């Protein structure tokens, strides 16, 4: 039965929601949804879909109602004349705002408060709510902003409750505080759309990957059928579903799966970012889950505007917290500070970030998602002018398992969590929303935990930048080997120093400055300044990892690879009581490496 008219009674939607809520089977849920969609006129189908999903617009648009529980109770009280306290007490007893609203509405005849509100809006008490009316009112609630916004929100909500039947009030109340709890997944909606409009499921899913707005897609197919889907294109400003990776545990398996050769990239441990620039010059950043996170990274917006030479684009990369003085990566948790909406200026200063780009999906009118990876990379190289803040992800074409393993350890010692191995075959398209074998991640299974501190010798330093200019921003530190009477580098440390420490360290170290590497120092790194090994500092780190960049225990665990401290930090203790020969020895570090507590890295969790 095709739907007619221009709206659907809200009570009809509510009845369908009640049956959906009662079912335990996903297929039944999809059938119930499909039948509701068939009864819904096309021009309000998007509103029904959004309501069922518990949102007013797709998540990535970031439209929020801004209605808290308290405000909802006030509106229920206003609409019924039942005192707020009574509403709140009932809620405390029931624990469900929907059931509370239903009972309060059911038990009390609507009183003066409600009536005056109806007069205020000029609506009749007998006029039934429609989906359109409910949705539009909720949208007005979301849009109310500035001074008096709270009052406007309460008034509008009171209006809705005044006109709602008890069952309707139940779902409105749950919706506004974000606890609809229907558990209808996006995929179930696609099933229902396919059933209701006889459109192939994969065509719908493809459209959803390109344009993840179920309300929009539903309306298109309801109005024009399957043909409408051909009009859905990759559009700057609208996030696409990110391509995902499979996982394997050995370089040999990975290369075999990818046909013997792969583009291997550092796998950065930060926040995935899909960066869009629209035709009108606006930059938007979307997260892995397609939330709009632009507000957290106003600096990245400026950086990419500078670094990417294209009018319109969609590129992808990883945002990483960075130590501006050493250029080293900081733990991924530091990005959390960027999520506080209020002090973003402060957070920007305190937690600087860089972005490492690894893909491009759209440039100036051209959808690149169907091009092979090599061509996309070429395009990225073409439009990107790397800067201090915007980089190309480190990559290499590799066809040898040993080389892959070496690159993997290089990535880890550079602060990454492993590598991404990507197919470069002719079919290596950007597979939106799919977890396939075109990308294979190779990560560590275990991370270790370093609980002890180490006493290490300063053998070199790097000049500081920004507010650390004129001091040593990072120090090259080493462990002692009594067998050779030499010092072997184990880390570059730039964290844990206060401003006073930086001044003091310069004074302490300058008397030992020499124009070349000291003969007792074994190093692969070239610092800006070398020292005679003399000053000993206490250092703590997250763990000891394999590293091809440092000489400590070189070859002891693996050929050509040494040991390094990951996320090293000065504890504040100057070990002036220790001579350099009394520093932690390379053998002790090897022992610590072997003894470290191994912690399993959970899939999906960042180490
Ligand atoms: P998934 O995203 O695959 O569901 P997940 O959230 O657990 O799983 P990981 O298993 O750590 O994430 O791996 C995928 C993530 O790695 C990507 O989502 C992206 O954020 C990140 N990443 C870092 N560097 C790269 C790179 N060079 N290419 C692709 N992704 C990268």
Image: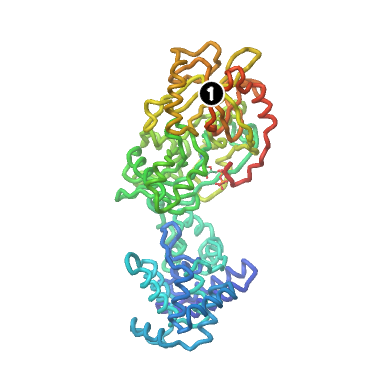
Foreground pick, 306 / 278? 306
Q: Give the answer, above or below, for where 473 lies relative to 127.
A: above
Using the rendered image of the protein, determine whether residue 366 is visible from the camera's viewpoint.
no
Residue 399's place in the image compared with 486, above or below, is: below
Question: Looking at the figure, which quarter contains the C terminus?
Answer: top right
Q: Residue furthest front?
A: 577
Q: How many marks?
A: 1
Q: Is residue 326 visible?
A: yes
Judging depth in this view, the residue of 451 and 171 nearest the camera is 451
Question: Residue 206: where, in percent of width, then height?
Answer: 49, 55
Measured from the top left, where is residue 286 in percent x and y? 44, 50
Q: Residue at x 42, y 45 (%)?
A: 347
Image quarter for ligand 1: top right
The residue wearing badge 1 is 477
Q: Position of residue 154 (x, y in %)?
A: 40, 74
The residue lying at 56 percent from left, 78 percent from top is 90
Q: Give SS at disc 1.
A: strand
Q: Position of residue 132 (x, y in %)?
A: 41, 75
């Amino acid at each position: 039965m095709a739907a007619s008219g221009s709206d659907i009674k809200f009570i009809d939607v509510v009845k369908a929601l009640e049956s959906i809520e009662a079912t335990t089977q996903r297929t039944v849920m999809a059938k119930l949804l499909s039948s509701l969609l068939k009864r819904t006129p096309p021009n309000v189908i998007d509103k029904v879909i959004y309501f069922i999903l518990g949102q007013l617009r797709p998540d990535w648009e970031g439209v929020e109602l801004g209605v808290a529980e308290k405000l909802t109770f006030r509106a229920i009280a206003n609409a019924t004349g039942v005192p707020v306290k009574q509403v709140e007490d009932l809620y405390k007893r029931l624990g469900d705002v929907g059931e509370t609203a239903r009972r309060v509405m059911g038990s009390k005849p609507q009183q003066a408060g409600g009536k005056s509100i109806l007069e205020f809006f000029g609506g009749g008490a007998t006029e039934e709510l429609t989906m359109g009316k409910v949705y539009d009112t909720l949208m007005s609630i979301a849009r109310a902003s500035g001074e008096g916004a709270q009052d406007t929100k309460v008034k509008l909500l009171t209006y809705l409750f005044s006109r709602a039947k008890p069952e309707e009030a139940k779902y409105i109340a749950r919706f506004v505080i974000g606890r609809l709890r229907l558990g209808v997944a996006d995929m179930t909606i696609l099933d229902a759309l396919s059933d209701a409009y006889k459109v192939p499921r994969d065509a719908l899913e493809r459209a959803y990957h390109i344009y993840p707005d179920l309300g929009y897609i539903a309306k298109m197919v309801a109005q024009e059928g399957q043909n409408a889907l051909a009009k859905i294109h990759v559009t700057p400003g609208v996030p696409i579903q990110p391509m995902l990776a499979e996982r394997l545990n050995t370089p040999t398996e990975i290369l075999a799966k990818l046909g013997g050769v792969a583009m291997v990239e550092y796998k950065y441990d930060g926040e995935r970012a899909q960066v869009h620039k629209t035709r009108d010059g606006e930059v938007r950043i979307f997260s892995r889950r397609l939330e709009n996170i632009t507000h957290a990274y106003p600096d990245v917006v400026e950086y990419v505007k500078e670094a990417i030479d294209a009018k319109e684009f969609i590129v992808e990369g990883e945002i990483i917290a960075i130590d501006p003085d050493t250029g080293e990566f900081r733990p991924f948790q530091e990005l959390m500070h960027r999520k506080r909406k209020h002090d973003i200026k402060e957070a920007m200063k305190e937690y600087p970030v860089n972005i490492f780009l690894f893909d491009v999906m759209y440039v100036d009118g051209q959808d690149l998602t169907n091009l092979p990876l090599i061509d996309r990379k070429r395009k990225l190289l073409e439009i990107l002018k790397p800067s201090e803040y915007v980089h190309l992800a480190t990559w290499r074409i590799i066809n040898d398992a040993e080389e892959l393993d070496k690159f993997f350890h290089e990535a880890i010692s550079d602060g990454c969590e492993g590598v991404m191995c990507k197919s470069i075959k002719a079919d290596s398209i950007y597979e939106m929303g799919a977890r396939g074998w075109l990308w294979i991640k190779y990560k560590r299974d275990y991370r270790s935990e370093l609980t002890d501190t180490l006493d290490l010798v300063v053998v070199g330093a790097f000049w500081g930048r920004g507010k650390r200019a004129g001091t040593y921003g990072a120090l090259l530190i080493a462990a002692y080997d009594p067998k050779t009477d030499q010092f072997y580098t184990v880390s570059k440390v730039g964290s844990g120093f206060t401003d006073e420490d930086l001044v003091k360290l310069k004074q302490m170290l300058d008397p030992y400055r020499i124009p070349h590497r000291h003969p007792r120092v074994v190093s692969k790194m070239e610092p800006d300044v070398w020292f005679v090994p003399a000053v000993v500092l206490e250092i703590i780190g997250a763990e000891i990892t394999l590293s091809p960049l440092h000489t400590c225990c070189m070859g002891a665990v693996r050929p050509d690879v040494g040991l390094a401290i990951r996320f090293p930090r000065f504890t504040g203790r100057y070990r002036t009581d220790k001579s350099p020969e009394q520093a932690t020895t390379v053998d002790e570090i090897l022992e610590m490496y072997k003894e470290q507590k191994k912690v399993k890295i959970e899939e999906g969790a960042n180490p």
